[in-house]
Image (cartoon, rainbow, N blue to C red):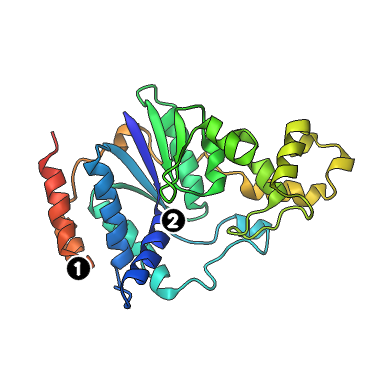
Amino acid sequence: MIVHLVDGTYELFRHFYGLRRARPDDPPLGAVAGVLHTVCQMLEGGATHLGVATDHVIESFRNELWPGYKTSEGMERKLLAQFHPLEEALAAMGVAVWPMVELEADDGLASAAKLSAADARVEKVSIWTPDKDLAQCVSGERVVQVDRKSGNIRDAAGVKEKFGVEPPRIPDYLALVGDAADGYPGIPGIGPKTAAALIARYGPLESFPDDALRDRKAALLFKRLATLRDDAPLFADVDALRWRGPAAGFAAVAARIADPRLEARVRALEAGLD
């Protein structure tokens, strides 16, 4: 089986701003509908096992470590208001959904990837997100990262080609170059090529000599921010991710979303189940 793990937060952003470009108003649950249609597309394409991780609360334990870490401040209210309805709609659709609270959606994806890869029945784990930090979860050709925006599928060789480092060294790399999306700056004067060269020479940051790392304390803190938690107990058996059709209350949820195509699409998928 192939397990598909979806970054619900990224998908919600993608559909919210994509829909805004297409029409002048902001449908109250328009982005939610977009994410559900994306899941339908995956199921129509043959996906059988999938799960979605979301940021139920934008802030996480990382905000206590670094005051500049990303928060919900400045996020558009119309977008923020669709996070919890998305989680409810996915659950009603029968999709495994993990609303993360103390951890982030990326930690949920990392945890789900680890749990899925531990099952010998799983042939491949596809993590659907362009986020750089998820590249650390890639393993050989079995756990891959799918960038829906570019269409690229990155295995371990693809991660090395893009970033210049192996997947396990992505937290070291991000600690040095920073991650503007997450709100930490990296180490001044170190760009992507220099970071990759330093890591190739010395290995993880903990092995860097003092004269090669001007601010070790900050670098190690940033590495902690970049290192995903993969120990969230999201499910006990990968079969919990098998889509078995919508729950009984899906019709009411679909009516609230006010997208007439959605329920018909889900019912057609349900009719095609074995």
Q: Is mark 1 on a helix, strand or loop?
A: loop
Residue 87 occupies quadrant: bottom left
Does the rendering let one see residue 106? yes
**Residue 2 against residue 220 in the figure, above or below:** above
Q: Which residue is drawn at 49% across and 71% down?
A: 75
Q: Residues within 10 Å of mark 2 (few under 14, many from 20)?
A: some
Figure label count: 2
Instruction: Report whether 57 appears left or right of 71.
Output: left
**For this rendering, which residue is in front, 203 or 242?**
203
Q: Residues within 10 Å of mark 1 (few under 14, many from 20)?
A: some
Amino acid found under the numbered disc labelled 1: Ala
Q: Position of residue 226 (x, y in %)?
A: 62, 47
Q: Position of residue 86 (x, y in %)?
A: 33, 60
**For this rendering, which residue is in front, 148 or 131?**
148
Q: Name the residue under label 1.
A: 258
The residue lying furthest to the top in this view is 120
The residue lying furthest to the left in this view is 271
Looking at marks 2 and 1 on the same chain, the residue that comes earlier in the sequence is marked by 2
Amino acid found under the numbered disc labelled 2: Tyr
Q: In the picture, which quadrant includes the N terminus? A: top left
Q: Where is residue 105 in the image (x, y as percent from the top left)?
A: 47, 51
Q: Which mark is residue 10?
A: 2
Q: Position of residue 242 (x, y in %)?
A: 27, 37
Instruction: Report whether 168 appears left or right of 77.
Output: right
**Residue 192 against residue 73 in the figure, above or below:** above
Q: Residue at x 72, y 48 (%)?
A: 176
